[in-house]
Image (spheres, rainbow, N blue to C red):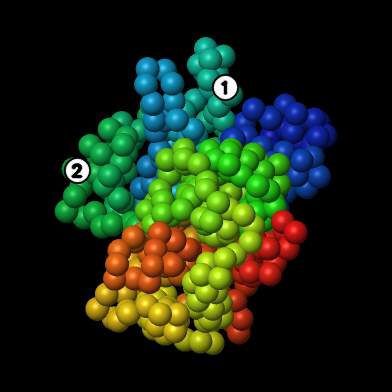
Amino acid sequence: MRRLRPLLRSFQSNSSLSAVSSTWRFYLSPRTQLGRRELSTVQTGAFRFVTPGISAQEYADRRAALADALPVGSVAVLSGATLRYKSGAVFYPFRQETNTFWLTGWNEPDAVALIHKTGPRHDDHLFSLFVRPKDAFQEQWSGYRNGVDAGTEIFNADSSQSVDALESSLPRILEAADHVFADTDSSCASVHLALSKVSSKTKPLSPLMNDLRAIKSPAEIANMRKAGRASGRAITDAMRKAWTGERDVHAYLDYQFIVNGCEGTAYIPVIAGGDRANCIHYTFNNDVFRDGEFILVDAGGEYGSYISDISRTWPVSGRFTAAQRDLYEAVLRVQRSCVSLCRESAGMSLEDIHGVTVSGLLEELKAIGFDVSLQNVQQLFPHHVGHYIGLDVHDCPGYSRREKLRKGHCVTIEPGVYVPDDERWPSHFRGMGIRIEDSVCVDDDSPYVLSVEAVKEVDDIEALRS
């Protein structure tokens, strides 16, 4: 294990740690604000939280794991995100490039991180940061920056320089490297130019990162559980109330996610009444609910930038009609069965579970009067049963759904049935759209449901409004 430097080492000899925390408060990035309390109570960099729930030691271990996956003499280049603008000076909320954030915890625009594998041993690597320097004028307008010194003192880089030095430094570093690992879609002009000159020895970084990120640590799972708990409670509370419009539910959930402890929403939610639920990614959320219809909600909050992804469907009136109950319980039985397979001992992949989902839905739908087969079931269930989750809603893009699920994989299980107004299907089900989705962590012999607070049994849903 790589030993980390003491927290704010250059200041501890002259002042108490609580005073240091106050002095250096502006060095903490937006994602570390929840960690400020820890700075006044812990004494070493190894055990403080750099971002909510994730310690400096865990970030160091992640970088060491990447270095172990690299050949000696390699340099991995991670280019952070830039601030995106909606129009003029109006910007979107900043979100760091995911691999950069996972390795560093740095959450400001225009950063570049390098991991240099210097030798064969576990700790034989160097971590360098290029970041925006402190700038009093810019900070007056746009808020405090971490600054260059925070790269070494807070984020444990071996070296930290102004991003202005990147144009002259990076080409030399990459030219001297035996191998370069990078994803070439960088928005940083200096990185893009430097990589273009060493393309013959550059390999994609994202496959290595996917392998490292796919299995979640206990700390990551704890963050996702916090997000799932807060989100599930908010969705259950929404079920208790009578609603007239989609926009009202959207606003309520946005607010309740934060009130319950999330930092905000993980994605634009789906709030769909009636047959609008048959549009899988309906996000207009501007129509009204009508009695006799379903409300389908697909929403979740995030904590420490780790997300929750939950879907629930319930009647506008709070009471299921006979047809609504039949179709809903058909989907629910399949969902329960598939959640139970999210355990390492089952020896199944997401692709395998998808096959179980299709077979289960065929059986259930036939039992309630659908003329459905393998040839046409996709018209009622057009999407996959699940995807990986973590820092991103669709986490580790490119990581195969054919991988056998292992302890620490986190996935969604979300069967759905969407019945168009079509004479091929029973008339009493037409226009209904149902999706039931949980965030689930794979354990050895049982699933760990991260979103259990969102009720889904018919009796429980009806009891909320009784």
Query: Which labelled disc corresponds to residue 298?
Result: none
The alpha-carbon separation of the residues under discs 2 and 1 comes to 34 Å
Q: How many marks?
A: 2
Residue 337 on image: x %, y %: 53, 81
Q: Is residue 440 left or right of residue 126?
A: right
Question: Between residues 270 and 149, which one lies in front from this camera angle?
Answer: 270
Q: Quadrant of the N terminus?
A: bottom right
Residue 458 on image: x %, y %: 63, 69
Residue shown at 60% from the left, 84% from the top? 445
Q: Is residue 402 left or right of residue 445?
A: left
Residue shown at 62% from the left, 54% from the top? 317
Q: Is residue 226 above or below residue 19?
A: below
Residue 30 on image: x %, y %: 59, 35
Q: Amino acid at mark 2?
A: Ser
Q: Amino acid at mark 1?
A: Gly
- The answer to whether any part of residue 459 appears in the image is yes
Question: Between residues 26 and 367, which one lies in front from this camera angle?
Answer: 367
Q: Is residue 441 above or below residue 238?
A: below
Q: Which residue was labeled with disc 2?
A: 196
Question: Between residues 445 and 66, which one lies in front from this camera angle?
Answer: 445
Q: Earlier in the sequence, mark 2 or mark 1?
A: 1
Residue 137 on image: x %, y %: 52, 12
Residue shown at 44% from the left, 84% from the top? 367
